Amino acid sequence: MLRVFIFLLAASPALAEPLPSVRDSPFAPFLIAQTFTCSGKTCGQMGSCAEACHALLVCGERARDRDNDGIPCESLCSARC
Protein backbone atom coordinates (compact mmCIF):
# COMPACT_ATOMS: atom_id res chain seq x y z
CA MET A 1 0.00 0.00 0.00
CA LEU A 2 2.80 2.41 0.84
CA ARG A 3 4.46 1.90 -2.54
CA VAL A 4 1.25 2.86 -4.34
CA PHE A 5 0.96 6.02 -2.27
CA ILE A 6 4.51 7.08 -3.08
CA PHE A 7 3.94 6.32 -6.76
CA LEU A 8 0.78 8.47 -6.78
CA LEU A 9 2.59 11.38 -5.17
CA ALA A 10 5.50 11.13 -7.56
CA ALA A 11 3.19 11.01 -10.56
CA SER A 12 1.10 13.97 -9.42
CA PRO A 13 1.49 16.99 -11.76
CA ALA A 14 0.81 19.34 -8.83
CA LEU A 15 4.13 18.34 -7.29
CA ALA A 16 6.02 19.34 -10.41
CA GLU A 17 5.64 22.99 -9.35
CA PRO A 18 7.95 24.23 -6.60
CA LEU A 19 6.43 24.63 -3.18
CA PRO A 20 5.87 28.25 -2.08
CA SER A 21 8.56 29.75 0.09
CA VAL A 22 7.91 30.60 3.71
CA ARG A 23 8.80 34.19 2.78
CA ASP A 24 5.83 34.25 0.35
CA SER A 25 3.43 33.56 3.19
CA PRO A 26 1.41 36.40 4.72
CA PHE A 27 2.63 35.03 8.05
CA ALA A 28 6.31 35.37 7.10
CA PRO A 29 7.17 38.06 9.69
CA PHE A 30 5.80 35.85 12.44
CA LEU A 31 7.41 32.67 11.15
CA ILE A 32 10.78 34.29 10.75
CA ALA A 33 10.64 35.96 14.16
CA GLN A 34 10.23 32.56 15.77
CA THR A 35 13.69 31.57 14.64
CA PHE A 36 15.35 34.05 17.01
CA THR A 37 16.41 33.05 20.50
CA CYS A 38 16.86 34.99 23.71
CA SER A 39 20.61 34.57 23.81
CA GLY A 40 21.67 37.98 25.10
CA LYS A 41 23.46 39.05 21.93
CA THR A 42 24.73 42.60 21.70
CA CYS A 43 23.50 44.87 18.91
CA GLY A 44 26.78 44.34 17.07
CA GLN A 45 26.18 40.58 17.08
CA MET A 46 22.63 40.82 15.71
CA GLY A 47 21.99 40.53 12.00
CA SER A 48 18.76 42.45 11.54
CA CYS A 49 16.28 44.91 13.00
CA ALA A 50 13.79 42.03 13.36
CA GLU A 51 16.23 40.21 15.62
CA ALA A 52 16.74 43.37 17.70
CA CYS A 53 12.96 43.84 18.02
CA HIS A 54 12.61 40.22 19.12
CA ALA A 55 15.27 40.77 21.79
CA LEU A 56 13.51 43.91 23.04
CA LEU A 57 9.86 42.85 22.83
CA VAL A 58 9.93 39.10 23.40
CA CYS A 59 13.03 38.64 25.54
CA GLY A 60 12.66 41.88 27.47
CA GLU A 61 16.27 42.90 26.87
CA ARG A 62 15.82 46.60 27.67
CA ALA A 63 19.55 47.22 27.16
CA ARG A 64 18.84 47.05 23.41
CA ASP A 65 16.97 50.39 23.75
CA ARG A 66 19.29 52.49 25.88
CA ASP A 67 17.44 55.80 25.38
CA ASN A 68 13.95 54.24 25.87
CA ASP A 69 12.55 55.59 22.60
CA GLY A 70 11.22 52.19 21.44
CA ILE A 71 13.91 51.80 18.77
CA PRO A 72 16.29 48.95 19.64
CA CYS A 73 19.81 48.80 18.26
CA GLU A 74 19.63 52.09 16.41
CA SER A 75 22.51 50.99 14.20
CA LEU A 76 20.09 48.35 12.79
CA CYS A 77 16.65 49.92 13.24
CA SER A 78 15.37 53.32 12.21
CA ALA A 79 11.83 53.01 13.58
CA ARG A 80 10.01 51.60 16.57
CA CYS A 81 9.18 47.90 16.58
Image (tube, rainbow, N blue to C red):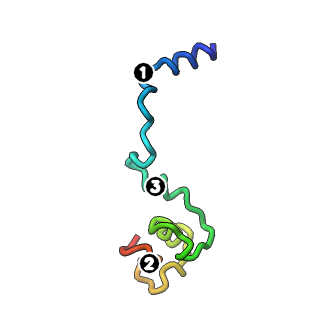
Residue found 44% across the figure and 36% down from its top: 19
Numbered circle sitting on residue 75: 2
Q: Nearer the viewer, mark 2 or mark 3?
A: 2
Q: Position of residue 73 (x, y in %)?
A: 47, 77
12 w.r.t. 49: above or below: above
Frontmost residue, 50 versus 62: 50
Element class at badge 2: loop
Name the outermost residue toward the bottom: 67
Q: Locate the C terminus by quadrant.
A: bottom left
Numbered circle sitting on residue 13: 1
Q: Amino acid at mark 2?
A: Ser
Q: Residues within 10 Å of mark 1 (few under 14, many from 20)?
A: few
Frontmost residue, 8 versus 27: 8
Element class at badge 3: helix
Q: Amino acid at mark 1?
A: Pro
Q: CA distance from mark 2 to mark 3?
A: 23 Å
56 w.r.t. 68: above or below: above
Mark 3 sits on what residue?
A: 30
Q: Residues within 10 Å of mark 3 (few under 14, many from 20)?
A: few
Choose the circle earlier in sequence order: 2 or 3.
Answer: 3
50 w.r.t. 60: above or below: above
Frontmost residue, 76 versus 80: 76
Q: Is residue 58 left or right of residue 80?
A: right
Residue found 62% across the figure and 15% down from its top: 3
Q: Nearer the viewer, mark 1 or mark 3?
A: 1
Choose the circle earlier in sequence order: 2 or 1.
Answer: 1
